[in-house]
């Protein structure tokens, strides 16, 4: 309950503060609010709280996902500073929208009631449609419109799934027993609706355009916070209905398609944000592999954190290089000579995304693969591992361009405001939690997906 | 002290990276201290202390930070600390960051030698790859990106397959943790064991290397920084034989028995084939790369023989070749400094104007050829002795490779140092005197008194043969 109240209060505060105070102060207020949320989470860690007659349940899994979202939001806030100032965009709405989105994500992660779930989903999505257009140019509007239209389709799928679920079980609450054609159709509909937001193939088509068209801090936010929230909901739904029968085969196909499509398509991209967009699709596939295990929550929570830190770090670096027209690979060349901190952050992020030890990304992959292997899904694990080998190729390519390429312009990158802090922090965490994975795993080990 | 030994180079490596002006003194000091700690550790190990230590890293998942020295680990540890010190001493003109990266690699190598937990081994094994890639990518030659992609893809494919094998070994085998002792107590047999063993085998064949998974090696050496520092570290990183000895064979003895005849043939073929190719090379680094490949084939012949003599010989050869092959790469770096090229024959009759260089070259080349009294001989001899018990035919092929080594190595030596004098060159500089005499000392010591090391290796090899089911 504390976390819910804090996040809501932060969102309101950021909105109203924006009317009176300069954007800079709003940013500090929002950041402080997120830090308060972190403290609130830490104080209530492991406590189970229910409210509104059981509609809202803050259990260990919801806390784990909220932790990831708050960390992602903090990274996004730290990364944005000079970015919007350079564009001359009065950015106070940005902070309010971010805060509302995190609040919506928290609601999504903390309920077993499908009605509440879709309310959370909309609270999360509507700010994002606005955020996607934050660059205020043609690409930004295109991204926003695409995101909105496909998001609306996804919501329609989801609502239709809810209707069928209610029709076959007589309940809006997850965990009701049902069988038969209507129930299976309901499960597939719910799965499809949430696969949009998590960007699982073949529901991922919006991802590259929206990631590329949005301003980079917003992309960072989408890649970390939205994915975490959507996966929380997906896990709640799929574990509650049970991955058996047609749902199992459908989901296995989706996951394998995702890891291969994401990685293979990423290989041929010429723009860094687009490449990372496809990489985020592939990572959605890896996260989903955990759902084949007996208790996916700890592995999933760990992977989400690992992924949020690594991909957040990568986008934070890109935010410093992006002047509004994206980051073609040539622009990365010679990064080492132009800014050692950015090069270090970039190296850490990509090696972690590629899953090389001793970085946190390795342990994330390890845990989800072991989780699926525990249920005997060796084929899925083997194929996903194989896809990870393909992925290593383009991560190395991105890395090689940045470290070993000849720069087009050799001038040093000027970093702004809080960006160096965010990059250093994320890089340190990726390394530290990679060397001592036991710490982060300890946070998530008590989590379970099922709400009883 | 085991943690000090493993992480001391890391500390100095980071220091060298953040303070590039002082990289050379920091690198020398760091590697010297590591060498001293390594020697003390080896002394204590001879006195019966194995420095075993373990603490959970990811307790719930059965992953431990478990380290200890056994015979194999301790001998190779000495090779790593010695060769790293010699290389950092010799490479006085490398970019500062390279010194730091070399020290980071040293930590990774010491860690993977000491690791008693399979996941910890994997972590160190992979972590070592990162500085190695950076060294090649940042300071390599014109074709470095191609070489880098080749090297990275081979290594990563191998190690991800191994990761799958690791998971299978534990979860299908039913071991409670990834500790070596638990895994050998719950061996995975049957068809699953064959698959898992194949995964390990591919990973370690890339890193031995063995034909046909060696193709990254010549490019890796040819494109790396000419000073030879990266080549020494790369040579030390070829831990495939160690991986087979410590992990793959003990974990899957039944699958190994199935593959053994084929593996012996493959090892012998690698030895003779690489020697043949080495003979046709016109570039020092490629010659050395293929020469080392040929020797690794002989080492693999020893390991795959499944005998005590073969196992001891393979690890001894691995340790010895780390020093003499490394020194030869540094020697090639010296030639590059003098003539600006790595061509096999930038001049001839060099013995006239640079007798010291000629003497150093002769000793190193003879060590590679396996002259008795130098460090190459005991390892090769024991390998072939062990292999003979398993397969006389393939041992004969291995013998041919040893003879061929004399042909390619001595021809290269003769062309450069004898015949009619051409362009003269300066003799050994003081730095070269230092590292050269140190390397020669180590080579002589290992050649004259191999007993110190073989005595330590024998119990490890006996344990391995015991796990393989008594052996022949």
Image (spheres, coloured by chain):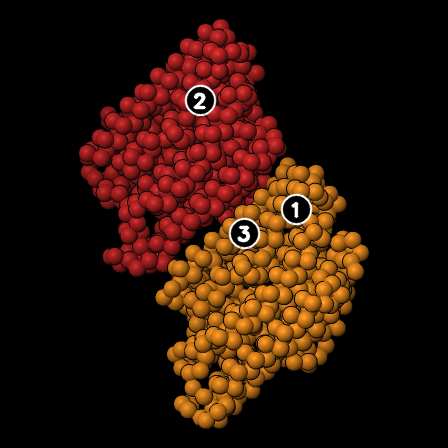
Chain colours: A red, B orange
Of the two numbered discs 3 and 1 in the rendering, the one whose residue sits closer to the viewer: 1
Res B20 seen here = no
Checking the image for residue A246, the label placed there is none
Comparing A7 with B143, the one in front is B143
Query: x and y percent of residue B38 in the render?
Result: 64, 66
Image quarter (top left, top right, bottom left or bottom right) of the C terminus of chain B = bottom right
Which of the 4 quarters of the picture holds residue B393?
A: bottom right
Left or right: residue A391 compared with residue B399 = left
The x, y position of residue A124, in whole percent, is: 36, 23
Q: Secondary structure at mark 1?
A: helix
**Distance Cα–Cα, label 2 vs label 1:** 38 Å
Looking at the image, tell me whether mark 3 or mark 1 is earlier in sequence order. 3
Q: Which residue is mark 2?
A: A191
Pointer 3 residue: B158
- Looking at the image, residue A382 lies above or below residue A30: below
What's the CA distance linking mark 3 and mark 2?
Answer: 35 Å
């Amino acid at each position: 309950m504390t976390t819910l109240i804090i996040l809501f209060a932060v969102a309101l505060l950021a909105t109203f503060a924006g009317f009176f105070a300069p954007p800079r102060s709003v940013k500090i207020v929002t950041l402080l609010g997120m830090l308060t949320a972190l403290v609130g989470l830490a104080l209530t860690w492991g406590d189970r709280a229910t409210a509104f007659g059981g509609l809202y349940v803050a259990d260990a899994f919801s806390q784990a996902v909220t932790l990831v979202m708050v960390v992602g939001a903090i990274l996004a806030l730290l990364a944005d500073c000079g970015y919007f100032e350079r564009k001359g965009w009065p950015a106070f709405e940005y902070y309010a929208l971010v805060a509302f989105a995190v609040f919506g994500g928290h609601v999504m992660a903390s309920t077993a009631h499908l009605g509440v779930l879709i309310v959370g989903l909309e609270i999360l999505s509507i700010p994002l449609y606005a955020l996607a257009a934050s660059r205020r140019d043609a690409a930004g509007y295109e991204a926003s419109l695409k995101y909105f239209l496909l998001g609306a389709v996804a919501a329609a799928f989801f609502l239709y799934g809810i209707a069928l679920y209610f029709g076959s079980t007589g309940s809006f609450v997850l965990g009701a027993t049902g069988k038969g054609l209507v129930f299976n159709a309901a499960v597939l509909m719910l799965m499809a609706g949430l696969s949009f937001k998590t960007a699982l193939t073949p529901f991922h088509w919006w991802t590259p355009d929206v990631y590329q068209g949005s301003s980079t801090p917003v992309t960072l936010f989408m890649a970390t916070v939205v994915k975490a929230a959507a996966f929380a909901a997906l896990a709640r739904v799929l574990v509650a209905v049970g991955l058996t029968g047609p749902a199992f085969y459908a989901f296995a196909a989706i996951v394998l398609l995702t890891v291969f499509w994401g990685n293979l398509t990423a290989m041929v991209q010429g723009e860094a944000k687009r490449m990372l967009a496809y990489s985020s699709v592939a990572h959605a596939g890896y996260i989903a592999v955990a759902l084949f295990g007996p208790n996916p929550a700890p592995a999933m929570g760990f992977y989400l954190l690992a992924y949020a830190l690594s991909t957040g770090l990568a986008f934070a670096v890109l935010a410093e290089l992006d002047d509004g027209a994206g980051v073609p690979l040539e622009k990365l060349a010679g990064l080492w000579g132009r800014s050692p901190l950015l090069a270090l952050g970039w190296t850490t992020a990509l090696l972690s995304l590629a899953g090389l030890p001793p970085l946190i990304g390795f342990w994330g992959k390890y845990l989800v693969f072991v989780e699926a292997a525990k249920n005997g899904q060796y084929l899925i694990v083997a194929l996903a591992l194989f896809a990870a080998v393909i992925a290593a190729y383009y991560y190395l390519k991105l890395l090689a361009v940045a470290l070993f390429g000849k720069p087009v312009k050799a001038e040093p990158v000027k970093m702004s405001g809080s960006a160096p802090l965010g990059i250093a922090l994320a890089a340190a965490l990726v390394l530290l939690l990679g060397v001592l994975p036991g710490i982060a795993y300890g946070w998530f080990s008590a989590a379970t997906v099922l709400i009883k | 002290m085991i943690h000090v030994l493993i992480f001391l180079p890391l500390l100095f490596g980071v220091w060298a990276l953040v303070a590039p002006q002082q990289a050379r003194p920091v690198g020398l000091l760091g590697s010297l201290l590591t060498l001293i700690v390594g020697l003390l550790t080896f002394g204590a190990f001879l006195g019966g202390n194995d420095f075993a230590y373990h603490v959970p890293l990811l307790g719930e998942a059965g992953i431990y930070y478990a380290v200890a020295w056994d015979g194999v680990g301790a001998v190779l540890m000495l090779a790593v600390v010695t060769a790293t010190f010699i290389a950092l001493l010799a490479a006085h003109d490398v970019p500062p960051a390279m010194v730091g990266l070399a020290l980071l690699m040293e930590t990774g190598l010491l860690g993977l030698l000491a690791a008693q937990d399979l996941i910890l081994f994997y972590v160190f094994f992979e972590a070592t790859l990162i500085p190695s890639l950076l060294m090649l990518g940042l300071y390599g030659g014109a074709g470095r990106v191609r070489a880098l992609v080749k090297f990275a893809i081979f290594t990563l494919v191998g190690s991800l397959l191994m990761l799958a094998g690791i998971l299978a070994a534990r979860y299908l085998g039913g071991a409670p943790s990834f500790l070596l002792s638990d895994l050998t107590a719950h061996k995975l047999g049957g068809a699953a064991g064959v698959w898992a063993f194949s995964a390990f085998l591919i990973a370690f064949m890339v890193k031995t290397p063995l034909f046909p998974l060696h193709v990254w090696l010549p490019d890796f050496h040819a494109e790396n920084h000419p000073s030879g520092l990266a080549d020494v570290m790369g040579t030390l990183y070829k831990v495939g034989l160690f991986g087979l000895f410590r992990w793959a064979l003990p974990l899957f003895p039944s699958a190994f028995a199935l593959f053994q005849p084929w593996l012996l043939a493959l090892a012998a073929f690698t030895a003779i084939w690489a020697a043949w190719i080495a003979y046709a090379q016109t570039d020092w680094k490629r010659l050395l790369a293929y020469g080392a490949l040929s020797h690794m084939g002989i080492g693999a012949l020893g390991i795959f023989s499944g005998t005590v003599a073969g196992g001891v010989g393979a690890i001894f050869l691995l340790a010895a070749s780390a020093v003499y092959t490394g020194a030869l790469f540094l020697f090639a770096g010296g030639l590059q400094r003098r003539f600006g090229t790595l061509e096999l024959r930038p001049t001839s009759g060099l013995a006239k104007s640079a007798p010291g260089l000629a003497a150093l070259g002769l000793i190193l080349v003879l060590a590679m050829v396996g002259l008795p009294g130098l460090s190459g001989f005991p390892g090769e001899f024991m390998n072939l002795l062990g292999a003979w018990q398993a397969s006389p035919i393939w041992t004969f092929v291995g013998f041919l490779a040893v003879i061929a080594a004399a042909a390619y190595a001595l021809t290269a030596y003769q062309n450069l140092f004898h015949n009619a004098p051409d362009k003269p060159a300066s003799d050994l500089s003081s730095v070269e005197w230092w590292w050269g005499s140190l390397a020669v000392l180590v080579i002589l010591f290992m050649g004259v008194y191999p007993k110190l090391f073989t005595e330590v290796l024998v119990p490890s090899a006996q344990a391995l043969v015991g796990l393989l089911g008594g052996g022949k």
